[in-house]
Amino acid sequence: MPSYTVTVATGSQWFAGTDDYIYLSLVGSAGCSEKHLLDKPFYNDFERGAVDSYDVTVDEELGDIQLIKIEKRKYWLHDDWYLKYITVKTPCGDYIEFPCYRWISGEGEIVLRDGRAKLACDDQIHILKQHRRKELETRQKQYRWMEWNPGFPLSIDAKCHKDLPRDIQFDSEKGVDFVLNYSKAMENLFINRFMHMFQSSWSDFADFEKIFVRISNTISERVMNHWQEDLMFGYQFLNGCNPVMIQRCLKLPDNLPVTTEMVECSLERQLTLEQEVEQGNIFIVDFKLLDGIDANKTDPCTLQFLAAPICLLYKNLANKIVPIAIQLNQVPGEENPIFLPSDAKYDWLLAKIWVRSSDFHVHQTITHLLRTHLVSEVFGIAMYRQLPAVHPIFKLLVAHVRFTIAINTKAREQLICEYGLFDKANATGGGGHVQMVQRAMQDLTYTSLCFPEAIKARGMDNTEDIPYYFYRDDGLLVWEAIKTFTAEVVDIYYESNQVVEEDQELQDFVKDVYMYGMRGKKASGFPKCIKTKEKLCEYLTVVIFTASAQHAAVNFGQYDWCSWIPNAPPTMRAPPPTAKGVVTIEQIVDTLPDRGRSCWHLGAVWALSQFQDNELFLGMYPEEHFIEKPVKEAMARFRKNLDSIVSVIAERNKNKKLPYYYLSPDRIPNSVAI
């Protein structure tokens, strides 16, 4: 009687083990085995982290093993089980690997295929075609699209974290409870003692140090000491939290009536302002997106205000970027003066603070929330709905959507919902952030997610001309490494452009992203279908880069750049100044956030800047969805490429007072999970 050796690996995360009864059936080309209870006498099977082996004897030859069925039956209480993989040693000594990496909940059954990645056209056997179809039918019932707010990309149909399919939930919900994490952060930072003075102002800038001294690090301390300087202000547009707004100014905007006479004391080349524009030395950051957005009205005791500044910047002879003119709102006029470095000290400082506050709002809601979190969720939902686990593109992308749908669901539940944590400290809370996303969706294009294209579109691609733009330099290295890796994987499974075009599952995935994620907007430029291997490589690079590198670049520096509150005020408690020569230090402090909002803000940027427990960084694929040697070799080359980028960045950062490390691959998590 033929005998098979079955090895079962249980996950090592919390609660992965089970006491339930586990049955296994082998499905071969010549027949199907009986159900076998996997159980060793006097032994605790399927403990967390365990690898258990069992001998399964069958009555007759089964032929080639095509599927295995795993069934879980209740022993005492319902007990979820996380199955990593199963290997089967056949009577003739062959090993077949069946990756799973899924939870089996309740009294469930799952059917697994062996780990070789297959396109639909590779499956000729009816039972395998049927398995493929059934898996997608089941997933499409579990992963449904929902409109959370009009005009938003569609998201998962789940009101709260526990409503999600078990496979995409966090291992421990406590780890991502925003209320808990923010409160814990405030406790760790010893700032709870300020909360009873919620509405009160700080007395001066030095007073902010009371909540800062416990948490200082190299960069945040440097920000605290130099935040008032024009050089530090300009530098942040290149390498701070939001390095995506600055662009080369090709023509002075009509609604910014700035003249050479106004700024000539800032110009170092004895040229007119227009000549400086022609030579490419003028840059602009325009916050027109904030024009007309409703400020937070959730607290009747505190008025909050927004502005929509335009900031003109200049590349000086040292190739450093400095501000030379700031207009705080979009429509020019007597009550909307252009502030200049030559103005009174506090006039200029307050104008810069307004720009920093506006930058914070756009960063949090658009650069961070919309363009990494929500976009990555779209890719994740479409992947689960349209790509079976056996598909090579599913195997490639699954690590890059890990916990993304869960973190976004948690955010909709606690953070950005009505009366959520976002409302507590932010001037765009209470609905303004929703208006911003709806407006920004008009500019969310496929091209703007292609990193090299986005840099080029802003005129920021010349490395000699703009030498200190580390976000661009490191981002291009990582983009190329990802693109090289995706090209190798695509080459393994797609012989020709025709195979790409005829892969209906792939086309359905791309179409789902376009139709539901991007709401079928032609202007978004998102492809409805993909016809070439080259386009497929680019598309996969966009998915992986957005979820990993782009998110890392705009998320993990939040504590560094935003913990010193005057440098990134989450709200302003007085309207923008309408005249020059009247601003005092007292006025500035009264405009900045009060003690309570400062504490909430600090708790938020601290919590958001922390890595997950057991974080998986770019190039780490501990779940072996791929079993083929050529893909494993491609992964090894990818890791080697990434290691060399880590070395390049470390060498560049040596002895730098302001090192830039957010795009170092050893600090880039695989997915959006915080």
Image (spheres, helix red, strand yellow):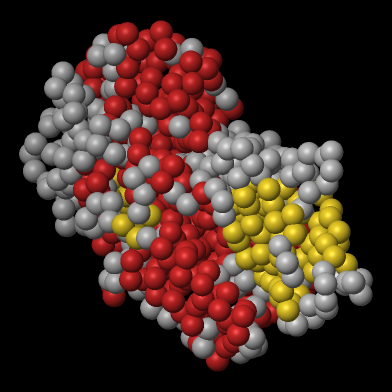
- Tell me: 535 left or right of 35: left
Q: How many marks?
A: 0
Tell me if residue 159 comes above or below residue 276 in the rendering. Answer: above
Q: Residue at x 55, y 91 (%)?
A: 498
- Between 351 and 221, the one nearer to me in the picture: 221
- Tell me: 626 left or right of 409: right
Q: Position of residue 581 (x, y in %)?
A: 17, 24
Q: Residue at x 41, y 63 (%)?
A: 141
Q: Position of residue 140 (x, y in %)?
A: 43, 66
Q: Position of residue 271 (x, y in %)?
A: 34, 54
Q: Is residue 618 visible?
A: no
Q: Residue at x 77, y 66 (%)?
A: 97
- Tell me: 311 left or right of 630: left
- Between 448 and 77, the one nearer to me in the picture: 77
Tell me if residue 291 comes above or below residue 207 in the rendering. Answer: below
In the rendered image, which quarter contains the N terminus? bottom right
Q: Residue at x 53, y 42 (%)?
A: 170
Which quarter of the picture shows residue 79? top right
Tell me if residue 409 comes above or below residue 637 in the rendering. Answer: above
